[in-house]
């Protein structure tokens, strides 16, 4: 199943010659139901279907954290994703920090599920041990960033109730396109969000923007996904993810590079033992 943010992140969530800011030939239109709930679900499923078959990916990224005063710090990390097929499971992913020295070797492993709590473990090199992340704590910030632990888990359609809200112009830099705006409400336990509003473009069916609402149903943060590139003539990946927290005035930018597909990763690279040797 698809990791719609990481590859989601995730999407864990592109190496043709086109970016999202350039015009591309319109994709074949799809038939969507009229009922808003069924239409919203169909949009999510179409996004999912367009990325099936990527098998595995490896990528490098830079994390830039900014506080309310504009002070910044940077981290270098790697992410690997293994595609998983099945109705009850999502993709597996592993994130490893390389720089700076104080976080070097820190690693997060995620085994995504649909309605059951995801399995997540973190390797803390200073303690030389693997810590299981409680399902009740996954709404907390990941490594001081504006991304939560649950943001690095799979975003499969089956984890949400869906509702189509409207169609409107996409956000920049693709404001010349039309986006479906849908609402999705988490069905899985202990989510830090009551709902999310997703802007999905009607050409490539890729998410361009997500608004996240906290447990008080107030707007918490916004994720913008830009610099999309196409790999293997099928798999789109955003190379710039910008998460802005409207309540703390902090933000985090993830810039991706070096995406490789079908590298031969297997399940042995995504177990707890692999975390301590992932440096």
Image (tube, rainbow, N blue to C red):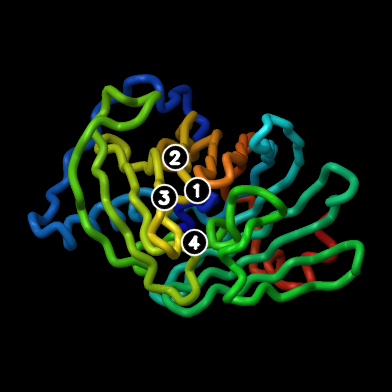
For residue 219, the mark is 3
Question: Which residue is pictured at 61% across the width and 37% down the height?
Answer: 253
Q: Is residue 254 above or below residue 139?
A: above
Q: Is residue 145 left or right of residue 123?
A: left
Residue 76 shown left or right of residue 39 in the figure: right
Q: Is residue 220 visible?
A: yes
For the view shown, which residue lies furthest in the bottom direction? 116
Name the residue carrying label 1. 11
User: What's the CA distance linking mark 4 and mark 3?
Assistant: 22 Å
Check contact, mark 3 vs mark 2: CB within 8 A. Answer: no
Disc nearest the viewer among 1 and 2: 1
Q: CA distance from mark 2 to mark 4?
A: 16 Å
Residue 140 image offset from top left, x and y in percent: 61, 62
What residue is pinned by disc 2? Answer: 236
Point out the tag, 1 or 3, that comes first from the N-terminus: 1
Residue 209, quarter of the rendered image:
top left
Q: Position of residue 73 (x, y in %)?
A: 76, 36
The quadrant in which residue 110 appears is: bottom right
Q: Which residue is mark 4?
A: 154
- SS at mark 2? strand
In which quadrant of the rendered image does the N terminus lie?
bottom left
- Position of 31 relative to 107 (above/below): above
Q: Earlier in the sequence, mark 2 or mark 4?
A: 4
Describe the element under mark 1 as helix, strand or loop: loop
Q: How far separated are the C-alphas under marks 1 and 2?
A: 8 Å
**Which sits in the foreground, 195 or 279?**
195
């Amino acid at each position: 199943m698809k990791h719609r943010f990481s590859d989601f992140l995730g999407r864990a969530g592109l190496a043709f010659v086109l970016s999202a800011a350039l015009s591309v030939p319109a994709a074949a239109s799809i038939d969507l139901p009229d009922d808003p709930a069924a239409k919203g679900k169909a949009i999510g499923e179409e996004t999912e279907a367009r990325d099936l078959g990527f098998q595995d990916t490896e990528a490098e990224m830079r994390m830039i954290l900014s506080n309310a005063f504009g002070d910044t710090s940077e981290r270098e990390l790697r992410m690997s994703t293994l595609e998983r097929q099945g109705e009850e499971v999502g993709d597996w992913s592993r994130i490893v920090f390389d720089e700076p020295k104080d976080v070097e070797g820190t690693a997060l492993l995620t085994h995504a599920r649909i309605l059951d709590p995801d399995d997540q473990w973190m390797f803390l090199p200073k303690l030389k041990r693997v810590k299981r992340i409680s399902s009740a704590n996954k709404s907390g910030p990941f490594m001081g960033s504006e991304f939560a632990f649950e943001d690095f888990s799979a975003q499969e359609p089956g984890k949400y109730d869906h509702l189509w809200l409207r169609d409107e112009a996409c956000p920049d830099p693709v404001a010349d396109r039309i986006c479906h705006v849908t609402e999705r409400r988490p069905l899985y336990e202990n989510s830090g969000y009551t709902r999310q509003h997703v802007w999905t473009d009607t050409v490539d069916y890729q998410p361009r923007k997500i608004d996240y609402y906290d447990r008080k149903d107030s707007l918490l943060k916004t994720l913008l996904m830009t610099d999309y590139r196409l790999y293997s003539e099928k798999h789109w990946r955003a190379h710039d993810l910008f998460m802005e927290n409207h309540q703390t005035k902090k933000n985090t930018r993830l810039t991706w590079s070096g995406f490789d597909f079908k590298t031969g990763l297997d399940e042995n690279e995504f177990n707890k033992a692999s975390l301590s040797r992932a440096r």
